[in-house]
Amino acid sequence: MLPLERLRRIVGAEHVLLAPEEMFAYECDALTWLRRRPAAVVLPGGTAETAEVVAALSEAALPFVARGAGTGLSGGALCPEGGVVIETARMKRLLSLDPWNRFALVECGTPNAEVSRAAEPHGLFFAPDPSSQNVCTIGGNIAENAGGPHTYKYGATARHVLALTAVLPDGRVLRTGSPLADPPGYDLAGLLVGTEGTCAIGTEATLKLTPLPRAVETLLFAFRGVADACSAVQRVISSGLEPCTMEVMDGATIAAVEASVNAAGYPRDAGAVLILEFDGGDAAVAESAERAERLCRELEVLACERARDRAHRLKLWKGRKGAFGAMGRLAPDLLVQDAVVPRSRLPEVVARVLEIGREHGIRMSNVLHAGDGNLHPNISYDRRDADETRRVLAACAGILQACVEAGGTLSGEHGIGLEKRDYMSLVFGEEDLERMRAVRDVMNGRSLLNPDKVLPAREPKTP
Amino acid sequence: MIERLQRLLGDAGAWEVAQDGEVARELGAARALVAAPRDQEQCAAVLRVAAEARCAVVPWGGGQHQRLGNVPRADLVLVTTGMAGIVTHDAADQTIVAQAGTRLADLVAAVRARGQFLPLDPAGVARATIGGVVAAGVNGPYRSGFGLPRDFLLGARTAHSDGACSRSGGRLVKNVTGFDLHRLYHGSLGTLAVLCEVSLRLLPLPEREATLALGFDDLERLDGFVAAYRASGLAAASYVLVHGPLLAGNGLAGGAADLAQDGMFVVLLRFHGTERGVAESLARTRDLLSRGAPAAACEAPEGAQAPLWMACREAFASVSPDGGGAVLRLSFLPHAGERSVLGGIVDSVAALVAGAGSRAALCAEPGLGVLRILLPEPPGEELLQRLLTFARREDGRLLVVESAPASWRLGRDVFLGALPHESLARALKAALDPAGVLSPGRLYPEEAG
Ligand SMILES: Cc1cc2nc3c(=O)[nH]c(=O)nc-3n(C[C@H](O)[C@H](O)[C@H](O)COP(=O)(O)OP(=O)(O)OC[C@H]3O[C@@H](n4cnc5c(N)ncnc54)[C@H](O)[C@@H]3O)c2cc1C
């Protein structure tokens, strides 16, 4: 039974949502084909309220899930049937920012981009930059160990979380980590990052801030196809250069972008474009950009542009930043797939992925964080069309299988959630999963928090 | 017990420790067995046998960081150097997979030979193993520029006390598939599982490397420089402060020899990058000197860089040459507003040490807010209390004993009460080390019964 009165007392009646029409928005995250309707949504106003809400639900033995902005792409924020969504939307205060010691303490419902916005006047930024950064929350980033175009140089979220306050599924508050170097004991904050909201609910995070680079050089190259763009990436890296970003878009993405309001002037006849960026000191960056340009021009380059100034740089990025939006307009639904392979295998894997797309007759466009070997095959479809949806899911299965066979894995940044839980055995054995379950059960022993995500259920014991 | 182990590992795979040997000294254990499995399966089998016999097992790589943490109960030392060698080095993908017992020095050299770079240079690098360095969660002067092993760790294979083998992560530079248990094993000091294999991310070998040494005989000027450096946003590959005498005889010839004097604090900055990039960083650093003018400044000549950094790395050390010394580590927030607090802390600590009739060499990582107090012998109770009082006087400071002889650590808590989350930590240990035999007491005291 929903402890309605108690929840209302904790957060205020206006912050407990129950009306069926209000539940609609919480039926899914950005992976729209998976849907479940929660019984209620509760919006606590801070750590203490979250702890009380969790304690109330735990006592009532009701399952619950944390939800940030709901931009997740693996069904992670889907609520258990009949359970309660704890939404962090009211927890978006920037509690403190110490520019000299380079950290910020924020509530976990804070949108990612807000952190960099607050840090910018101090010459700092928060390095993880998922494409959804204007809306996705720090709590969601921590849960998913989110990455972005700049992850190649700066690392994913795990490298940027210094301390975390989290509510355990029984309502206890855990404060772990420190802005001080090397606190003793187990790295619980590090452990919690990437557990996809199955171990604890993050409420406050101390985030590392990074100095903004003095100089940035952005180059755009157009190639005949994705394989060439990936070869260019490999050449640049093998030469010892250290770009901060290596983003590749395929021909279908270019076409979608150029037909949208975010048209960036990418050559329409190109089979792929590569955005290469260097950041750092003025001389270092200029030198690297010159060398990279020379290296890439040794390949068959259809066009090359080097940003002259900030405005020009933003223009080169405009298409990439608007890519998901542009693809989203092609059909009612967009499935953003995510997988990783060793970088050197990208050319063959992308070819295979495109082939799988054709085999299943689906509409696909690809965006790659090529430096990280991270692919995003994006599939435009209509989930109300059962046959099309079936083909889309079959193609996804084929893509994941192909990536794993190439030495890759199921997800580079979007997580396993519900979508890929049953693929976990492609990558991990039962003993591997058993350790992960054991750790989850230490925190979430009754499986009330976000049950049935990430880790498949234990295989029934054969007597 | 030894027979069972020898049946598993062969006669040469298990033996009794020498009374006067390293194991006895580092673990304060007069009697123990040693087992040397050659792969993950054997390692798990050893653990299962030990668990059945309720034998406490201490994983042992190169023995270079056994002084971290409290003294664990040790019936069996599990030496990992039988699990050595590079499994795969994918140069094109900039990743390497190595068995845990591989010497870090061998790994660094192998990677370097193919134009790549693994920025790990903890004390004892010549003998330390990669598994040990990951389990200890330590790095040397590269810590300030590149972080800890955790920041390069992509995955691990481990053996557990129920005899199971498991794996987390993989060898992909970006991966969010499953829980990253390797991040939990990092720095866990061998209390959760035995690391058998690790995969790491590599960087390209920098084209050029330069080292600038700045000698300060005035702590206010030192703070002036530290603040100016922070404001500049410059990113050095290494940034450390060492007491001059620690550098004596390490290639600081000519005028630079002045730097090695007593009373001199030397900031060492190492820059990596392209030719022009390094020149630019050096020039920008020199521009800062007007705000924090050193008494002496020089760029280390080509041949002097390596010995200088080696001296510096060993100075950080939890390893002291005669084995009798101790290292205390004070962590602090390096800035109060724009002001650097380092000079003030150095001054106070030096006075406390002198006041207790001891001497100490100091070294620090100014950017991270870490001061190491290197004592020729373990601290007396009075000095320890005074330092602890100093550390606790303000929020945002933390003091631990990083290294000391086993004889001194026995029966103490080297974390000085700073270990948090005891019940959760114990539950995690029980989940991953179900038999409770891995380095018992290394972190939290063993529970009676
Ligand atoms: C257009 C688009 C582009 C994207 N680009 C990227 C990208 O470049 N890189 C990338 O990594 N991801 C990307 N994503 C995916 C998504 O934005 C990230 O996974 C993001 O981190 C999710 O944040 P959120 O606040 O929306 O979380 P939600 O979707 O609300 O939740 C995601 C998961 O986190 C858990 N969670 C949320 N808040 C908390 C909390 N406070 N404590 C504990 N668990 C919590 C939920 O239970 C759920 O399991 C993109 C998504 C879209 C729609």
Image (cartoon, coloured by chain):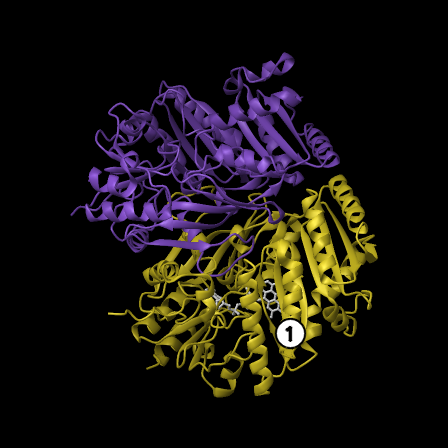
Q: From where the camera sits, is residue B391 visible? A: yes
| Image chain in purple | B
- The 10 Å Cα crowd at callout 1, few under 14, some 14 to 19, many 20 or more, is many
Callout 1, which amino acid?
Gly
Q: Is residue A130 visible?
A: no
Chain letter, colour yellow = A
**Label 1: chain letter:** A
Q: Is mark 1 within 8 Å of ligand 1?
A: no
Instruction: Identify whether A44 is placed above or below B288.
Output: below
Tell whether A389 sits left or right of B232: left
**A192 over B105 or under it: above or below:** below
Image spot of residue A256 (x, y percent): 74, 73
B445 or A40, which is in the foreground? Answer: B445
- Mark 1: which secondary structure? helix
Q: Quadrant of residue A195?
A: bottom left
What is the x, y in percent for residue A27? 50, 80
Q: Is residue B63 left or right of residue B203?
A: left
- Report x, y in % for residue A160: 54, 51
Compared with A166, B329 (above or below) is above
- Quadrant the N terminus of chain B occupies: top left
Seen in the image, is A108 located left or right of residue A237? Answer: left
Percent across and percent down for residue B185 are 40, 48
Please tell me in which quadrant of the rendered image residue A348 appears: bottom right
Residue B254 position (above or below residue B82): above
Assign ligand 1 to one image quadrant. bottom right
For disc 1, the marked residue is A357
